[in-house]
Image (spheres, rainbow, N blue to C red):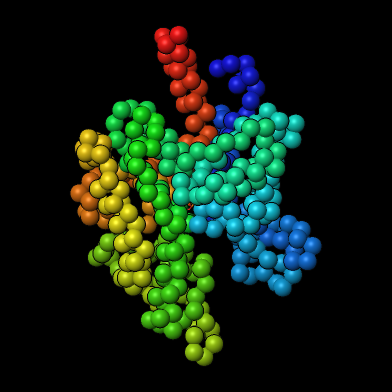
Amino acid sequence: MSLIDKFTTDIGIDLGTCNTLVYVRGKGIVINEPSVVAVECGTKRVVAVGSAAKQMLWKTPDNITAKRPLKDGVIADMDLTEKMIKFFIQKVIPRYKLTRTRMKIGIPSCITEVERRAVMEAAVHAGAREVNVIQESLAAAIGAEIPIHEPAGHMVCDIGGGTTEISVISLSGMVVTRAIRLGGDEFDEAIIKYVRSVHNLVIGQQTAEKLKTEIGNAVPDKNIEKREIKGTDAITGLPRRLEIDSVEVREALKDPITQILDEIKLTLSTTPPELAADIVERGIVMTGGGSLLKGFPKLISKETGVPVILAEAPLDCVAIGAGKSFELEREISSDRSIYDMLNN
Ligand SMILES: Nc1ncnc2c1ncn2[C@@H]1O[C@H](COP(=O)(O)OP(=O)(O)OP(=O)(O)O)[C@@H](O)[C@H]1O
Ligand SMILES: [Mg+2]
């Protein structure tokens, strides 16, 4: 490691639709908070960021709004995104060190050039000296400790809140990538829609997410679980309770689950045969919060015939991988300098 590297702070950021994570070299994950900002309506003054702001979502008085600045993996509100990054960065990096900070931000591969520039701009305005981006699946693979530099096919499926990205990686590069703007948020939406159409009950996103994470299941389970939920009757407009079970939640999630399964199958079908053979042997690695849906890895394995492995810390992989990518780049550039010598 050079002297300059020694005095530089390398940080990896997973600027996610649902959660923002910051990894600092030598320290690990130092920020893990919901991507939510609460502002005062007239003045636009920020009153809360992260967990404190998430508690306010859909429960704010008229003069405050709590918003998620990202949607489907991309910036929906530039100003709020910038403020959110600034808040998290300044929480972990002292101001005097900012000029010696390098940032690598995980971005979905389906974003446009304009969206990519918006992410970089937001981070530059937050104060870092050097800002770069890395594709989310590549970062997820590094974070999941997949030996991506090998001349062998590795498949990663990252299911986030707003995006799902499936990639085949070999020799540190992406060979095949498919990304869709669908993730855990759509799972919540599907539950809201189901409860409304079958039970005439209007429920909020937090209630739907709780049902999904607590009793959601991608495959039938003989142990049927139940939860009581509360919402507003769609006809009378009055508050009402309802008991719902895991079979119904699975039924509600059928559509988004099928869409993700189809994308995985399509990615496999477009993978060169030699790499596909590696994947059959090594399995598909799942990352992202959506992969924590009970039974999802089992269902994907059953439907594709390929073993599926859930990463050790699925929610942390992108931030860890983005941060660690600096070390990998250093190794690659030292290899390259040897080849440059041979070629001169
Ligand atoms: N146990 C669980 N079961 C099902 N879903 C879960 C579970 N835990 C978290 N999730 C879902 O994971 C999603 C968040 O995952 P993650 O933090 O990886 O997304 P993100 O990185 O913020 O989004 P994106 O990558 O799309 O920008 C949310 O939709 C959340 O409800
Ligand atoms: Mg993500």
170 versus 3 height, above or below: below
> Residue 337 placed where, x, y %?
47, 14
Which quarter of the figure is the N terminus placed in? top right
Please name the residue shown 49% across and 85% down the image.
Answer: 234
Q: Residue furthest right?
A: 43
**53 relative to 160 in the view: left or right:** right
Which quadrant of the structure image shows residue 272?
A: top left
Whether residue 15 can be seen here: no
309 versus 50 height, above or below: above
Of the pair 276 and 48, the residue shown nearer to us: 276
> Residue 33 placed where, x, y %?
58, 50
145 versus 227 height, above or below: above
Marks counted in the figure total 0
**261 relative to 115 in the view: left or right:** left
Please name the residue shown 39% across and 31% down the image.
Answer: 172
Which quadrant of the structure image shows residue 64?
A: bottom right
Of the pair 319 and 270, the residue shown nearer to us: 270
> Residue 50 placed where, x, y %?
62, 53
> Residue 165 placed where, x, y %?
40, 49
Please name the residue shown 67% across and 40% down the image.
Answer: 124
Q: Residue furthest front?
A: 344
Of the pair 222 and 173, the residue shown nearer to us: 173
Please name the residue shown 73% across and 57% down the image.
Answer: 46
Whether residue 238 can be seen here: yes
Which quarter of the figure is the C terminus placed in? top left
80 versus 129 height, above or below: below
